[in-house]
Image (cartoon, rainbow, N blue to C red):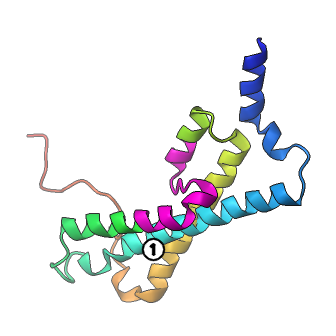
Amino acid sequence: MSKSDNNVWSKLRGEEDFKNMNSQKMWELVSVAAAELLGTAVLVGLGCGGLVMGIPGTDPTITHLNTVLTFAFAVALCVTVFGHISGCHINPAVSLSAVIFGQISIPKFFIYMISQCVGACFGIFAIKLISPDYCTADNFCVTLPNPHVGAG
């Protein structure tokens, strides 16, 4: 194994992230985790919150354009507020691609992923607290295939 292979493997294992852990490195990890948690909570809360009145049988005025714009503004807000702290992945798939391309280590990926999953739960929980009557549908904020589209 060449020296460059060893460097890549040591970066993936996170040796630099967790070697000689001091208060500054710990604070950076906590900041990254908090930014991903809050960013994902904001994305899910605002994005899915924009669909609350669009649940079938409640208010037919919510269109696909409303949904797209709601999520676009939520992502723009998250990138603006949290991008300089953690890169604003706000999605475990994006964090996994960052590992594949060597931008973050595998241990740091798990910090990102756990923070994002907890943040998504907080976002949905906030919507359920704000408007519990509209969050009872089985398909609330779930991507489902159109029942009118078929194979034949």
Magenta stretch: dominant secondary structure? helix
Q: Does the rendering let one see residue 120?
A: no
Q: Secondary structure at mark 1?
A: helix
Where the N terminus falls, by quadrant? Answer: top right
Q: Residue at point 41% right, 74% down?
A: 46
Q: Residue at point 66% right, 66% down?
A: 34
| Residue 112 screen position, x and y as percent | 63, 53
Quarter occupied by residue 117: bottom right
Q: How many marks?
A: 1
Q: Residue at point 30% right, 74% down?
A: 51
| Residue 47 screen position, x and y as percent | 38, 69
Residue picked out by circle 1: 45
Q: Is residue 12 left or right of residue 96?
A: right
| Residue 113 screen position, x and y as percent | 61, 53
- Residue 12 shown in magenta: no
| Residue 42 screen position, x and y as percent | 49, 71
Q: Is residue 46 left or right of residue 55?
A: right
Quarter occupied by residue 10: top right
- Residue 82 shown in magenta: yes
Magenta residues, start to end: 75-96
